[in-house]
Amino acid sequence: MSNIRFESVNAASSRHALPEEKVVTKRATTIFGKNVFTSNKMKDFLPKNTFKELTKAIEIGEPISREIAEFISQAMKTWALQNGVSHYTHWFQPLTGSTAEKHDAFFEPDENGDAIEKFTADALVQQEPDASSFPNGGIRNTFEARGYTAWDPSSPAFIYESAAGKTLCIPTVFVSYTGESLDYKAPLLKAVNAIDKAATDVAQYFDKAVTKINTSLGIEQEYFLVDLSLYNARPDLQLTGRTLFGHMSAKGQQLEDHYFGAIPERVLAFMVDLENEALKLGIPLKTRHNEVAPSQFECAPMFEEINLAIDHNQLLMNVMEQVAIRHNFKVLLHEKPYSGVNGSGKHNNWSLITNTGINLLSPGKTPKTNLMFLTFFVNTIKAVYEYADLLRASIASHSNDHRLGANEAPPAIISIFLGSQLDELLDEIESARVAKKVKSEANLWHGIPKIPELKLDNTDRNRTSPFAFTGNKFEFRAVGSSANSALPMTVLNAIVAAQLIEFKVEVDKQIKKGTKKDLAILNVLRKYIKDSKAIRFEGNGYSDEWAQEAEQRGLSNIKSTPKSLDIYIKDETIALFERLGIYSKRESEARHEILLENFYKKLQIEARVIGEVVNSHIAPACFTYQNELIQNVKGLKDLGLPKEAYSSQLNLVERISKHANTILEQSEEMRQARKKANTIEDMREKAIAYDEVVKPFFDEIRYHVNKLEKIVDDSKWPLPKLRELLFIH
């Protein structure tokens, strides 16, 4: 292992950026969307009437007829073949958290035995992958394999290039034979539809021209890069995505000199290559920079319609992996790959845009437009307040647990940061006195503070807030870097839709009783501002004082993933999703089961890796060095030297034995605890057993490994063998 370690360091230190001729920054305008079957390309390949019907169907969400689908399949095939594509696949997002695909060739033999290139509407619209092999939470039995992928025409097909060739990828949903969704996309589309309808109904209080609301999303992606040879020298990094053991570098992020610093040449070459590939796939990457931790970076795209933004983010993570290999890097998307330095998140910037081009979360310049802004602004705050635990569950995972609240990321307590200007404004509106009856709009606004024109950066940013208003959007900062954003965005869209529906019911009741519309809206908003005040917090979310204050406010602080996930099977959550048509009761229960299973299995893998590393590397390294010390002591004794001559060596033998034996004992106890947890049938109890019984052994074992490291650091004796063999720097 020591040889591997030193060879890896030598390989990493000798690497250089790829030659310029292999990585050249290309003008975005010349390559953007090159490998995407965009609307303009469809227009070139489709009959005029067919293109018009397809566009209309996508805009209003209507099903596409088989006749239209046949035209599209032929157009798609022609375009793909012209670009050197040999295979096609339905590209979907199962509940594994990654993407999936099954490639089929365009080639088919005809009745004469000759080869023809075939791609029909049936192949475009629907395929049948094996549903039993994907997580399903009990929806499907192992022997019931049938499941279907169905084309999502709102997300364009694209060509994925690799060294092995080109594949036409068709974004799809994935459902079981009995109709339940088995992926992240189908529920997201249902949630998008729910908020479209609810928000449109409310927006028409202010503008009858609004007939559709689009949800906009921009996803900032943080990640780490590590040299491929160093990655391959670490079994823990390979198998779990993070270092389970490690020796802190003398220089970490304490000087804060990496953030926004000059991008290293090798990394910049990777970034340029990544941007070129992403742009060809229609992913509008715009920003790149160093992040806070050493070897941590970030990229961010332009805002897009939410379904497309999430498809692009999933695709981006795939492309990052592929491009990194070309540059002898490994991309780490784990939320906390290294202890002692910041982890990675995926900031989701969310807003609502009308079909008339108005951002509903952007303050206006007149009382009417400001009241519209206030309506959607306050309803979002109220939704987060009412469903904070559900929003917390949407970002819960084993890996994100390492990051949330670790003095670097938003805490597990869900709160909202608005900035002092808007926070004070809501307080003023709440306390202002309004006449019960008004004759004109001017009277309505008498005594109510007018909203000043807000700049995008009207307030300081609060990096400790999990959910912050940042000018004309809300930024959900607690989403983990490896997560599929579809789940938290499904939840966010669902809870805001539910809140807007409730808001309209309350306003309509007041209007029916004779209250003027604007006054009715303001009355309900003032009530919501008061009711949801506890969720608003402008201070330091990392502080112990905030945890105590949050408890007094009645806010939850659920730090454990298994307990956080309980919200999915509460009656009110199931009723919410059923009411909006997003999940059935069976689907909610299945997702709860799947997330729990994923949680305990990742802990199970980590426990096994810790056991293997302890028994195969760390303990043998200790005993090897002890034997060398013992031989040294024996030689000095044979020379007749007094005990003082070898007392240091004996002390080292004793100290190393103490920690090495403890590590082995703890490893065996952890193995027995894991075996016992595996016998538990109830998935929730099994996950809790892993979280509360198995996981504490990790810290105990690491503590004693760190003590061994301290022995190496503190000893006056040169201990190169132990330092090499532990390979944990």
Image (spheres, rainbow, N blue to C red):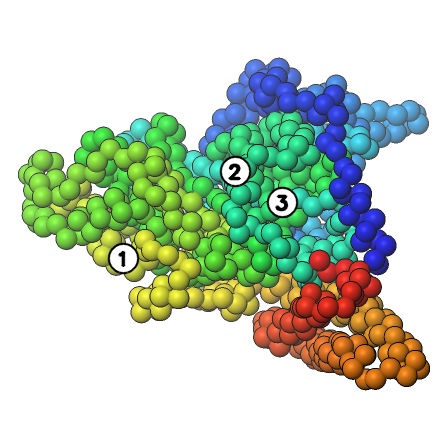
Horizontal arrangement in the rendering, residue 666 relative to residue 391 (left or right): right
**Residue ID for mark 2:** 260
Question: Circle 3 — which element?
Answer: loop
**Which residue is at 13% across, 43% downward?**
448
SS of the residue at dot 2?
loop
**Mark 1 burial class by Cα count in 10 Å: few <14, some 14-19, many 20+:** some
Q: On the rendered image, what quadrant is the C terminus found in?
A: bottom right
| Picture layout, residue 64 above or below residue 717 | above
Quick check: 257 left or right of 642? left
User: Can residue 80 be seen at all in this image of the molecule?
Assistant: no
Q: Amino acid at mark 2?
A: Phe
Q: Earlier in the sequence, mark 1 or mark 3?
A: 3
For the residues labelled 1 and 2, say whether their Cβ atoms are less than 8 Å apart.
no
Above-or-below relation of 11 to 161? below
Looking at the picture, which amino acid does disc 1 mark? Lys
Residue under numbered circle 3? 295
- The image shows residue 613 at horizontal and vertical percentages of 77, 66
Q: Quadrant of residue 328?
A: top right
Where residue 362 appears, as percent x and y from the top left, is 32, 35
**Mark toward the start of the polypeptide (1 vs 2):** 2
Residue 462 is left or right of residue 368, and the answer is: right
Q: Quadrant of residue 163?
A: top right
Q: Nearer the viewer, mark 1 or mark 2?
A: 2
At label 2, counting other C-alpha atoms closer than 10 Å, the crowd grade (few under 14, some 14-19, many 20 or more) is some
Residues 354 and 72: in front is 354
Quarter occupied by the N terminus: bottom right
- Per the model, the C-alpha gap separating discs 1 and 3 is 40 Å
Mark 1 element type: helix
Task: Out of 536 and 523, give the one closest to the viewer.
Answer: 536
Mark 3 or 2 closer to N-term? 2
State the separation of the CA atoms marked 3 and 2: 12 Å
